[in-house]
Image (cartoon, rainbow, N blue to C red):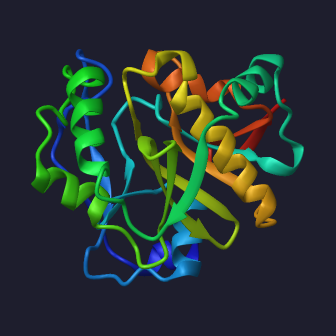
Amino acid sequence: MNDEQRIKLFATAPHPCSYFTDREAQTLFLDPAVEVSGPLYTQLSQAGFRRSGNHYYRPNCEGCRECVPCRVPVRDFHYSRNQRRLLSRNRDLQLRWQPKPDAQAYALYVRYISERHRDGDMYPPSREQFDSFIGAHREDSLFLHIYLAEELLAVALCDPMGDGLSAIYTFYSPQEQRRSLGKLTVLKLIEACQQRNLPYLYLGYWIRDCQKMRYKIDYRPLELLMDQRWVRLN
């Protein structure tokens, strides 16, 4: 990637891995002084980078390649029987796209982190954390809000790029387990790509041996970035 060669990248010192307790991780960050335009963001995503707040990064761990960038080629996406049932089960929900999170979003985020990720490095949640992670979005970022009447049940933050949408983070009501809101938001983001004639939904990293990150393989076909080449799994 030519643009990547002309910009500075910084590697962190080894730190505890968020996914495997017996491993250390190392992360490669884009120089924060670089202004990331839309075309550059697209190139970075195609090369396996992700955005978190104001930072663009990718794993750079010595001797480990578990974090595999993945994306859904939405034109060829096939709904499974369970996915069609999930959509039918949630027909009573309303979707709204907004340029920023609504007033209910922070309380929902606190509930989600407190009940679903107490064992992670995002616990305990705080307003500062929310503002630096969710609130520090790009000017063109989009927030998909999912409501039951006027009750906010889920929020999905995504970034539009030249070749798709990048799903940055989703949080949802932990009490609504039957609705499978995390899976529902992925399906709705796939629909959004299709409606906008964008070829890909970037889903971040698929990690085969991590239960929390393995679910992405359920969206087929799926493309994985392996040895600097996107490989399709049908």
Q: Position of residue 52 (x, y in %)?
A: 33, 56
Whether 77 is drawn above or below 81: the answer is below
Whether 41 is drawn above or below 23: the answer is below
Is residue 32 in view from this perspective?
A: yes
Residue sitting at x 41%, y 41%: 151
- Residue 173 is left or right of residue 2, and the answer is left
Q: Position of residue 209 (x, y in %)?
A: 48, 15
Is residue 47 in view from this perspective?
A: no
Residue sitting at x 24%, y 49%: 106
Whether 162 is drawn above or below 153: the answer is below
- Residue 21 is left or right of residue 141, and the answer is left
Residue sitting at x 87%, y 50%: 75
Front position in the image: 173 or 198: 173
- Residue 10 is left or right of residue 36, and the answer is left
Q: Position of residue 210 (x, y in %)?
A: 44, 18
Whether 228 is drawn above or below 218: the answer is below
